[in-house]
Image (cartoon, helix red, strand yellow):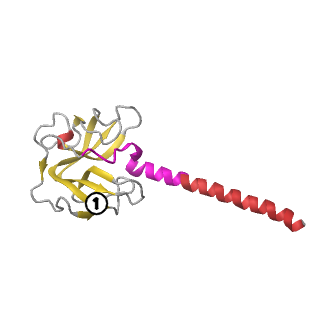
Amino acid sequence: MLKKRIRKPIVLLVAALFLVLGACANDENTESTENMEGMDHHNMNHSGSGEVPEGLKEAENPTYEVGSQAIIESDHMEGMKGAEATIVGAYDTTVYTISYTPTTGGERVENHKWVIHEELQDAGDAPLEPGTEVKVNAGHMKGMDGATAEIDSAEETTVYMVDFTPTTGGEKVKNHKWITESE
């Protein structure tokens, strides 16, 4: 009888401990995926229409041909690193990391990867220098389209539009913009 009285509270205590530890682990995991590289990617439009900005030129000799497969090395979005991608489009352009405050309000987004030259309003022909203030004409994330941004970095390279299934599961991402050649 004494064993039953002791056993029940111990079982309840152990069960409560597991629940508390499990909740803490889930909170930490959520925080790390939401703030990868300081950004909340839950507002990111993972799939796109496949339309490309006016003036964007197809790459003549891309490393990865349209229709080919490649493994994504980038981790700037949850479930991307290690995913097998199908190349949907390859374009030669200048890519930028930008920092901006969303037009919908909220915290400033720092070093967003990637916006291309053709997605910037009145960008001209020459690549823009870091520190240049620009207006964004791209809706990769909620509140990005129409935002005033600052160029953080610029690189002339081939960018790819890709389809992939996230390594974390879920629906296939179609026409994702943009992955650079080095990614």
**Residue 26: percent from left, percent from top:** 55, 54
Secondary structure state at the residue bearing disc 1: strand
x and y, in percent, of residue 177 in the image:
26, 49
* Residue shown at the point (28%, 60%) measured from the top left: 85
- Dot 1: few (<14), some (14–19), or many (≥20) neighbours within 10 Å? many
Point out the residue furthest to the right here.
Answer: 1
Left or right: 90, with 1 as reference point = left
Which quarter of the picture shows residue 18? Answer: bottom right
181 shown above or below 54: below
Stretch of the chain drawn in magenta:
27-49
Along the line of sight, the residue nearer the viewer: 44 or 136: 44
Q: Residue at x 34, y 48 (%)?
A: 46
Q: Residue 74 location in percent, x, y?
A: 31, 58
Q: In this view, does 123 lie above or below 111?
A: above
Q: Is 177 in front, or is 144?
A: 177
Residue at 41% across / 55% down in the picture? 170
Please indicate whether residue 173 sits to the left or right of residue 95 in the image: right
Q: Is residue 52 visible?
A: yes
Position of the C terminus, as image quadrant, is bottom left
> Is 19 displayed left or right of 76 in the figure?
right
Considering only vertical position in the picture, is 46 above or below 165?
above
For residue 86, which quarter of the picture?
bottom left
Dominant SS type (magenta): helix
Q: Which amino acid does label 1 sit on?
A: Ala
Q: Is residue 109 left or right of residue 65?
A: right
Work out which quarter of the rendered image holds the N terminus and state it: bottom right
Q: Is residue 183 something one can see in this rendering?
A: no
| Quadrant in the rendering for residue 115 | top left
Residue that appears at 37% across and 38% down: 108
Residue tagged 1: 85
Q: Residue 57 location in percent, x, y?
A: 11, 48
Q: Is residue 30 magenta?
A: yes
